[in-house]
Amino acid sequence: MTALTLNLSPTLELTDDQFYDLCQHNRDLRIERTANGELLIMAPVGGEGGSRSGRVNQQVFNWIDTDDRGIAFDSSTGFKLPNGADRSPDAAWVSRERWDTLTPEQKRKFPPLCPDFVIELRSESDSLQTLQAKMQEYIENGARLGWLIDPKKQQVEIYRPGQVVEILQDPETLSGEDVLSGFTLNLKPIFNRL
């Protein structure tokens, strides 16, 4: 199933609090909001996608356990981007310095910032063009590094501000570079057939 897009404007415009409450009352769905106010409703991923996403997050969270420079998040976390969109990357990281500037209320709801680092993991139903546009949106809103991982093609697109997208075919690992210094993602368990 691809995402269902609902255009509520101009009939209804949700406040940030209303959007947050809508998401809390529909936890079985993954709901995002574009900068134009459209709601994107996505069904949960299938077994293979869920397993791959879990393996990605496992590696990020294991690294966080040894490095206290930031906070990691899984796909259930929504972020309020500077352009007004509410997005939920499959994995994300925010530097502790930026995280600590938020109020307790901002930390509890959808943090009003773009993560420093994001990962999107393409599932069978995801449109590549949609994910590429989402990655560009993260970079335009302040992300310093982003990985779009496509297990079917065994390909990774690396996004950095002010640079052309780098495409790697069948890499074994990815480096967190200077954003997540010391982090390496092992792609073998993500690319191997389940």
Image (cartoon, rainbow, N blue to C red):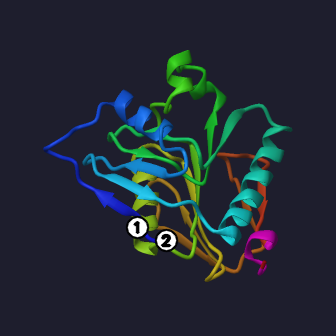
Image location (x, y in percent) of residue 125: 51, 74
Q: At 40% across and 72% down in the image, what residue appears? A: 129
The image shows residue 102, relative to residue 11, as above or below, that is: above
| Residue 191 falls inside the magenta stretch | yes
Q: Taking 107 as reference, is 184 left or right?
A: right
Residue neighbourhood size for the residue with mark 1, other residues' Cα within 10 Å, grouped as few (<14), some (14–19), many (≥20)? few
Q: Taking 154 as reference, is 62 left or right?
A: right
Relative to the observer, which residue lies in front, 101 or 112?
A: 112
Q: At 40% across and 67% down in the image, what residue appears? A: 130
Residue neighbourhood size for the residue with mark 2, other residues' Cα within 10 Å, grouped as few (<14), some (14–19), many (≥20)? some
Tag 1: residue type?
Thr
Please give the residue where the numbered disc 2 appears in the rendered image: 126
Q: Pointer 1 and pointer 2: residues touching (CB < 8 Å)?
A: yes
The disc placed on residue 161 is none
The disc placed on residue 130 is 1
The image shows residue 170, relative to residue 8, as above or below, that is: below
Q: At 68% across and 63% down in the image, what residue appears? A: 50
Image location (x, y in percent) of residue 79: 48, 39
Instruction: Give the residues in magenta.
Output: 188-193
